[in-house]
Image: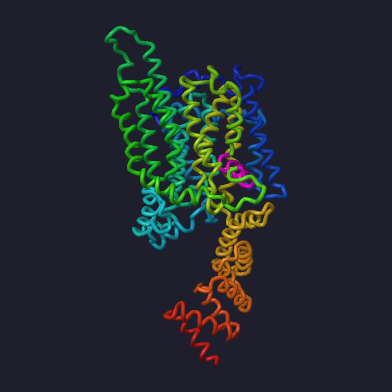
């Protein structure tokens, strides 16, 4: 965290800027500050309104309607109160102290922030187990199933961190696989907090603006990834923030090199600091290692390459020959290039054979007359919700980016500020495109984890714009509004996934609508809920959930699940009728025929038992259950 070359330090002009009540604070808001305040206020109003809306269309905003009163309204009230300047000024001094620590003692600030992040995610373990491949991943570890079977697209470090490490911890008797997964997640949250400190310190702004940038990056909905899910998207969020922080530090090094070179005499053989060392070389190494590790975790790291290249070109242009004499810099260039070269065949095969069909295919046929593909209104609404959930300040950052002069104003811009804007654009643009075009295979409500990486890039861009807006306006109290504005929904989402009863009720409400979710999304979610209720022996609730899954997608497996729940309720005639529907759809569905046979026996239906015996004699002649059914039919005669 000390690799940035010229970030603000205690005693610098930016750290010495007037505080929130100092004489330098302006009486009014300049355009950027006004946009920032209005954006935060609009989000607060929208969250309150969505809580009472009859529709669940804005599911990225309305989580507090499914929380308890305290969890719903206390965080919201604090965020709303921070929009009042008088209240925010009470909080600003504490944030400025943390911001000064980011600039002057980044390791101490990082460790403090990491501890808070670890405690936060540790206090809210995911008890819903709904997101992505949560149950499949942990099930693979429990059963020692090869990750190549369930996740053949997983990259080496993903397998190491999320399969091999928990399995080893369980085999060694250190802790259960579930506890190991949670411990790895907590460590990831701590690391995310540390790289958020790195990123905030690399922006040459005052302490309050640094604190706001830190919070904007840390408090995204993706913080829920660190509470129990076992997948590489958590590490990819860290990689995005780390590469961004190191890239900005490289620009500081480039600015320092230009400044030192300009202060030297041009006489031949002149020495001085310009000829010694390579400012920012440590940041070059940090960026290269972060990118290389990211590629080994997940192919999403390809989206970081444009920002890395921009930072490298700016740095090389400033240091020229000196850059090639730095071992750290040469390693920083070599590591990602070597890793990309080694992983290129794997990346290509995964993208072409898996991603294009699984992650970018339409979720459902487009209705006649509707806009196709990325412009389908239902898809765009889901994208809106995903952004509001995962990166709550993203749209505020976008609005700020449109304010004239924000990136180029000299009194607020650090040296090399144009390069910063280029890095931010190169980072955000490819991931914004992914966010717009991606169609997660299990739907955005369940597979939002796959879009956490793009959302982290949006948060980084928003944090940069927000920090510069606060710095330009010199309204330090705005930092409190930003911090609480992003921390409140992050806390609420953590609370949501930690409360299994309320979170299941929320899923049921979202699947019931309005608006109606796609049939495949409904089927998969109702099936998930059915199995959760089934394992708790809540067979009435399980049967209702499985029935809705079968209504949305009447596949033989969904029908069989429904029939199993009906059988556990003692309704064997009903179970038999449903099993018959399953085998009518697939006459070779062995599990369905077993259900027909057992339910027929339990309901005394000899004709259907005989029919099942004949089918099972053909499909599973050596199965003991087949012999039992055949013997019952023979005895019934």
Numbered range of the magenta stretch: 375-391
Q: Residue at x 49, y 42 (%)?
A: 453
Whether residue 597 is situated above or below residue 272 in the rendered picture = below
Q: Does the magenta stretch include residue 185?
A: no
Quarter of the rendering occupied by the C terminus: bottom right
Q: Does the magenta stretch include residue 390?
A: yes
Q: Overall secondary structure of the magenta stretch? A: helix
Whether residue 509 is situated above or below residue 115 in the rendered picture = below
In the displayed structure image, the side of residue 601 where residue 155 appears, left or right: left
In the displayed structure image, the side of residue 9 where residue 432 appears, left or right: right
Q: Which corner quadrant of the image does residue 143 belong to?
A: bottom left
Q: Which corner quadrant of the image does residue 138 belong to?
A: bottom left
Q: Can residue 198 be seen from the camera position used here? A: no
- The front one of 29 and 314 is 314
Whether residue 231 is situated above or below residue 392 in the rendered picture = below
Return the residue found at the far left: 269
Q: Can residue 636 be seen from the camera position used here? A: yes
Quarter of the rendering occupied by the N terminus: top left
């Amino acid at each position: 965290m000390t690799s940035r070359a010229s970030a603000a330090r205690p005693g610098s002009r930016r750290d010495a800027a007037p505080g929130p009540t100092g004489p330098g604070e302006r009486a009014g808001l300049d355009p950027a500050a006004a946009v920032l305040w209005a954006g935060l206020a609009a989000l607060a109003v929208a969250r309150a309104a969505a809580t009472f809306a009859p529709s669940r269309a804005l599911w990225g905003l309305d989580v507090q309607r499914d929380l308890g009163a305290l969890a719903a309204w206390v965080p919201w009230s604090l965020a709303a109160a921070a929009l009042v300047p008088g209240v925010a000024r009470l909080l600003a001094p504490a944030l400025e102290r943390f911001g000064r620590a980011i600039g002057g003692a980044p390791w101490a600030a990082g460790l403090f922030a990491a501890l808070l992040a670890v405690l936060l995610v540790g206090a809210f373990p995911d008890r819903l187990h709904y997101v992505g491949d949560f149950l499949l991943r942990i099930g693979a570890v429990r059963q020692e199933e090869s990750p190549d079977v369930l996740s053949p697209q997983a990259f080496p470090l993903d397998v190491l961190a999320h399969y091999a490490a928990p399995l080893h911890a369980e085999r060694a008797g250190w802790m259960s696989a579930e506890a190991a997964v949670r411990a790895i997640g907590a460590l990831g949250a701590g690391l995310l907090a540390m790289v958020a400190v790195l990123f905030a310190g690399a922006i040459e702004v005052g302490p309050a603006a640094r604190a706001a940038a830190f919070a904007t990056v840390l408090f995204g909905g993706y913080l829920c990834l660190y509470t129990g899910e076992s997948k590489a998207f958590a590490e990819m969020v860290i990689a995005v923030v780390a590469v961004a922080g190191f890239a900005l530090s490289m620009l500081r090094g480039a600015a320092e090199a230009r400044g030192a070179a300009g202060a030297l005499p041009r006489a031949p053989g002149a020495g001085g600091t310009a000829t010694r060392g390579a400012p920012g070389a440590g940041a070059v190494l940090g960026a290269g290692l972060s990118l290389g590790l990211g590629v080994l975790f997940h192919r999403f790291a390809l989206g970081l390459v444009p920002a890395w290249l921009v930072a490298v070109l700016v740095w090389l242009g400033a240091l020229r020959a000196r850059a090639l004499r730095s071992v750290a810099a040469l390693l920083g260039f070599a590591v990602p290039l070597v890793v990309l070269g080694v992983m290129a065949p794997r990346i290509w095969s995964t993208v072409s054979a898996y991603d294009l069909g699984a992650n970018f295919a339409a979720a459902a046929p487009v209705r006649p007359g509707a806009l196709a593909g990325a412009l389908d209104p239902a898809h765009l609404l889901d994208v809106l919700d995903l952004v509001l959930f995962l990166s709550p300040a993203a749209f505020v950052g976008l609005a700020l980016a449109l304010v004239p002069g924000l990136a180029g104003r000299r009194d607020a811009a650090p040296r090399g500020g144009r390069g910063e804007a280029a890095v931010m654009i190169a980072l955000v643009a490819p991931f914004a495109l992914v966010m717009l075009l991606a169609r997660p295979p299990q739907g955005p409500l369940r597979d939002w984890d796959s879009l956490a990486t793009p959302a982290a890039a949006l948060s980084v861009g928003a944090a940069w714009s927000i920090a510069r807006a606060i710095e330009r306006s010199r309204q330090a109290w705005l930092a409190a509004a930003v911090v609480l504005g992003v921390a409140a929904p992050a806390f609420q989402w953590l609370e949501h996934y930690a409360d299994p009863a309320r979170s299941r009720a929320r899923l049921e409400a979202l699947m019931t609508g309005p608006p109606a979710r796609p049939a495949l999304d409904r089927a998969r979610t109702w099936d998930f809920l059915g199995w959760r209720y089934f394992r708790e022996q809540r067979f009435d609730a399980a049967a209702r959930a499985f029935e809705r899954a079968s209504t949305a997608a009447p596949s033989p497996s969904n029908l069989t699940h429904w029939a199993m729940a009906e059988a556990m309720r003692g309704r064997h005639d009903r179970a038999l009728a449903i099993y018959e529907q399953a085998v009518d759809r697939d006459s070779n569905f062995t599990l369905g025929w077993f259900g027909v046979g057992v339910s027929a026996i339990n309901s005394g239906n000899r004709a259907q038992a005989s029919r099942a015996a004949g089918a099972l004699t053909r499909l599973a002649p050596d199965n003991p259950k087949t012999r039992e059914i055949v013997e019952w039919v023979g005895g019934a005669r």
